[in-house]
Amino acid sequence: MSKLNLIAQLLMGAALLAGMWLARRGKFRAHAFCQTSVVFLNLIPIFYFMAPVFHKGVQPGLPHRLNDSFYSVATAHAALGTLAEVLGIYIILVAGTKLVPAALRFKKYKPWMRLELVVWWLTILLGLGTYFVWYGGASSKANDASAGAQQPTSSAPAASASPQAAPKVVTVEISNFAFTPKELTIESGTTVIWKNNTGRHTVVADDSGFESTVMAAGEEFRRTFEREGRYQYYCSLHGAAGGADMAGTINVTARRQPR
Ligand SMILES: [Cu+2]
């Protein structure tokens, strides 16, 4: 979805440049159609993809995590993108309709339209930045990290060990937008370590009982489960409470062997 949006945004940015060229050629009707289509088409990815992702993944970290590029680039992109979209609709209303009262209308089209094009393209650049911070660079780094971490992990006690040697630490791997194992059963007193191998993810309990920060590749989050029960959790960037998409479950059973 993020890749599809990236391609769509680049195409729309290119269409706006083509539309500018149409205006220069004096083809104003085609110009108006082109620019108007882009501004309104862009409402679809905004409301169906970007706004929900921002709401779920970025808003919870604001403003205290703005020193992390994951939050700051996305926030700048969202702010400038909102401006670009609102300004675009305003220009369309002034230039193409009589809905805007005289006092609020501009008379010189060119400076406003140029400003809009610049703001729009700056938004695209910040969007590219967001894409690479969120989905790009981190994953290639993570591949190295997970390859290097493979050997020490395999020597750790396995989750399926006999009751006599009940493991006190169990690992859940995070990669390919999934938690592995997705469902894990442990004895109470066991510590679960979530190891993030690729991209940025979080571990958030459905009942808010625990919550990690946004983890970069190579980072981990741990929690010791003392109470028996069923703990559902999800990644706040790629999943949702109730087991949707990127989510998992920890079942905590009674300790089989008293100390
Ligand atoms: Cu995730």
Image (cartoon, rainbow, N blue to C red):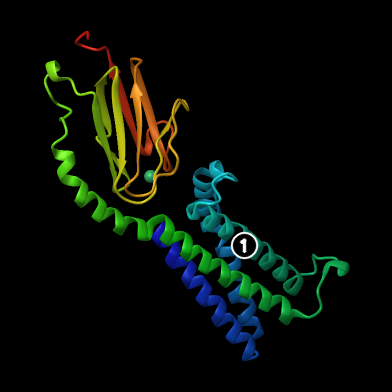
Question: Please, which residue is most extreme toward the right here?
Answer: 103
Q: Quadrant of the C terminus?
A: top left
Question: Please, which residue is most extreme toward the bottom here?
Answer: 25
Q: Nearer the viewer, residue 179 or 25?
A: 179
Identified at 49% across, 67% down, the residue is: 9
Q: Quadrant of the N terminus?
A: bottom left
* Residue at mark 1: C-beta within 8 A of ligand 1: no
When the figure is inspected, residue 187 is found, relative to residue 221, above or below; the finding is: above
Q: Nearer the viewer, residue 152 or 253?
A: 152
Quadrant for residue 222, please give it.
top left
Give the image location of residue 190, x and y in percent: 28, 22
Q: Is residue 213 left or right of residue 77?
A: left
Q: Nearer the viewer, residue 126 or 111?
A: 126
Q: Is residue 160 left or right of residue 252?
A: left
Label 1: which secondary element: helix
Give the image location of residue 45, x and y in percent: 51, 57
When the figure is inspected, residue 258 is found, relative to residue 220, above or below; the finding is: above
Identified at 23% across, 49% down, the residue is: 146
Give the image location of residue 106, x and y in percent: 81, 74
Question: Which quarter is ligand 1 in?
Answer: top left
Give the image location of residue 4, x and y in percent: 41, 61
Identified at 66% across, 84% down, the residue is: 28
Residue type of the residue flagged with mark 1: Leu
- Which residue corresponds to mark 1? 80
